[in-house]
Amino acid sequence: MLALTRKKGEAIVINNNIELTVLEIKGDQVKIGITAPKEVPIYRKEVYVQIQEANKEAMNTDGLDALKKLLG
């Protein structure tokens, strides 16, 4: 993991097309602005983890049922 220090109004550029800007700092919270191409999905980590778990569950459930139907 790369750890960088930024102040309010400063930014970080990732892969020439994603920019993270520190918008606001209040106590222990930091507000970050993200500028990225529309095709780049951006999720909060807890939402991303939920999506991944739901996808795994759907694959296990649906895939197993479909396989059972094929094998009869």
Image (cartoon, helix red, strand yellow):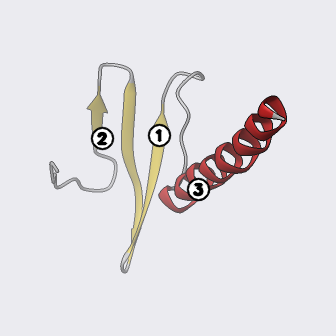
Residue 59 position (above or below residue 3): above
> Closer to the observer: label 3 or label 1?
3
Q: Residue at x 60, y 58 (%)?
A: 50
Q: Amino acid at mark 3?
A: Glu
> Please, what secondary structure does the residue beneath circle 2 have?
strand
Label for residue 11?
A: 2
Count of labels in the image: 3
Mark 2 surroundings within 10 Å by alpha-carbon count, few (fewer than 14), some (14 through 19), many (20 or more)? some
> Please, what secondary structure does the residue beneath circle 3 have?
helix
Left or right of 17 in this view: 4 = left
Label for residue 64?
A: none
Residue 14 position (above or below residue 10): above
Left or right of 49 in this view: 1 = left
Residue 41 position (above or below residue 9): above
Pinpoint residue 60: horizontal percent, then vertical percent.
65, 48
Mark 2 or 1 closer to N-term? 2
Q: Amino acid at mark 1?
A: Ile
Label for residue 53?
A: 3
Q: Residue at x 37, y 80 (%)?
A: 27
Label for residue 34?
A: 1
Left or right of 23 in this view: 49 = right
> Please, what secondary structure does the residue beneath circle 1 have?
strand
Q: Nearer the viewer, residue 18 or 45?
A: 45
In 3D space, how far apart are the residues under numbered discs 2 and 3 (Cα atoms)? 32 Å
Q: Quadrant of residue 71?
A: top right
Mark 3 surroundings within 10 Å by alpha-carbon count, few (fewer than 14), some (14 through 19), many (20 or more)? few
Residues at discs 2 and 1 in contact (Cβ within 8 Å): no
Pinpoint residue 72: horizontal percent, then vertical percent.
84, 35
